[in-house]
Image (spheres, grey):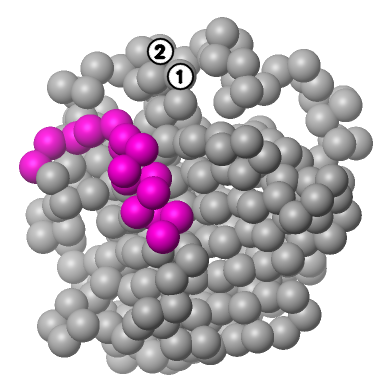
């Protein structure tokens, strides 16, 4: 979001995100294997903004289930092995909220976190969930984390039938640091495909898990179930990358670490 004030994305913002998910202009394919494709865009000179797009065809997974899994924060804490901490901060509208997410970065990089305004739009049996970074006075950057900036990140879910869907993940992020090339390569060739596979596996296990964890509670489908406190837009401001710490990790060498089992 490029405006000066925080706004709730409108239909045009969702249409723009969808067009970028479908566009091939400016994207270079870096991975194509086992129903997963990854594209990247080259960094602009003098900028540290990374753009990556991943697409996966998910068999035996309906678009509705994918939408539930990507929304269900309690379930994310179970399947997302990269998450350090995640929680919802407050509600803006029936289809927009503010939340916190921190994640593990490949060693020896410092871990990152974000505060984002997330919004979602069902379109028949297709769905979009997207976010961008905001500031909230009660959640300043932490000393042991690097506060990253999501310029625009999200998912587009397209139904391909009762039990098949296509998931597209699009991320335009400033990680607030000069990253070594091995990180960028690892993201497109290993981390992104691995993350997509984890989402697919999480979807296959969701129905059984949800039956044992408040099966009737889905506030993203039933806004009246949302118990988050209301947040006025005036409490939020745009998170400017230039106001955050920018660290140089470009010389850090990759370290061997045990990979979590899928």
Residue count near mark 1 (Cα–Cα under 10 Å), binned few <14, some 14–19, many ≥20:
some
> Circle 2 is placed at which residue position?
229
Of residues 229 and 94, the one nearer the viewer is 94
Inspect this view and state whether residue 113 appears: no
Residue 161 in percent (x, y) is at 80, 51
The residue nearer to you, when weighing 187 against 106, is 187
Q: Residue at x 73, y 66 (%)?
A: 57
Residue 61 pos. (x, y %): 81, 51
Which residue carries the number 1 mark? Answer: 94
Asked if the magenta segment contains residue 12, the reply would be yes
> Percent x, y for residue 202?
77, 51
Q: Is residue 79 above or below residue 233?
A: below
Can residue 66 be seen here? yes
Question: Does 177 appear in magenta?
Answer: no
Residue range of the region highlighted in magenta in the rendering: 4-19
* Residue at mark 1 to residue at mark 2: CA–CA distance: 12 Å
Identify the image quadrant of residue 256.
bottom right
Write down the quadrant of residue 247 in the picture: bottom left
> Does label 1 or label 2 sit earlier along the sequence?
1
Nearer the observer, 13 or 201: 13
**Residue at horizontal 18 percent and vertical 77 percent from the top:** 47
Taking the spot 84% from the left edge, 46% from the top edge, the residue there is: 162
Q: Residue at x 80, y 21 (%)?
A: 215
In the rendered structure, the answer to whether residue 220 lies left or right of residue 102 reads right
Lateral position of residue 179 relative to residue 160, left or right: left
Q: On residue 161, which mark appears?
A: none
- Could you tell me which secondary element the residue under label 1 belongs to? loop
Quadrant holding the C terminus: bottom right
Q: Establish if 199 lies above or below 131.
A: below
């Amino acid at each position: 979001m490029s405006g000066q004030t925080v706004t709730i994305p409108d239909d045009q913002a969702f249409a723009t995100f969808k067009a970028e998910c479908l566009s091939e202009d400016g994207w270079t394919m870096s991975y194509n294997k086992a129903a997963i494709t990854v594209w990247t865009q080259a960094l602009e000179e003098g900028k540290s903004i990374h753009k990556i797009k991943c697409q996966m065809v998910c068999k035996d997974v309906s678009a509705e289930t994918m939408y539930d899994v990507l929304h269900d924060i309690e379930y994310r804490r179970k399947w997302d092995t990269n998450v350090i901490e995640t929680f919802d901060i407050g509600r803006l509208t029936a289809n927009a909220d503010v939340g916190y997410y921190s994640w593990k970065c490949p060693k020896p990089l410092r871990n990152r976190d974000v505060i984002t305004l997330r919004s979602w739009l069902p379109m028949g049996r297709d769905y979009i969930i997207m976010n961008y970074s905001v500031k909230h006075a009660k959640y300043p950057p932490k000393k042991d984390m690097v506060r990253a900036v999501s310029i625009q990140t999200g998912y587009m879910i397209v139904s391909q039938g009762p039990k098949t869907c296509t998931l597209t993940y699009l991320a335009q992020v400033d990680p607030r640091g000069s990253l070594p090339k091995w990180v960028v390569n690892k993201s497109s060739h290993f981390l992104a495909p691995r993350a997509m596979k984890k989402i697919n596996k999480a979807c296959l296990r969701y129905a059984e898990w949800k039956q044992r964890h408040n099966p009737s509670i889905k506030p993203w489908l039933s806004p009246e179930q949302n118990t988050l406190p209301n947040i006025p837009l005036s409490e939020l401001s745009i998170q400017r990358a230039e106001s955050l710490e920018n660290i140089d990790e470009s010389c850090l060498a990759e370290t061997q670490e045990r990979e979590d089992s899928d």
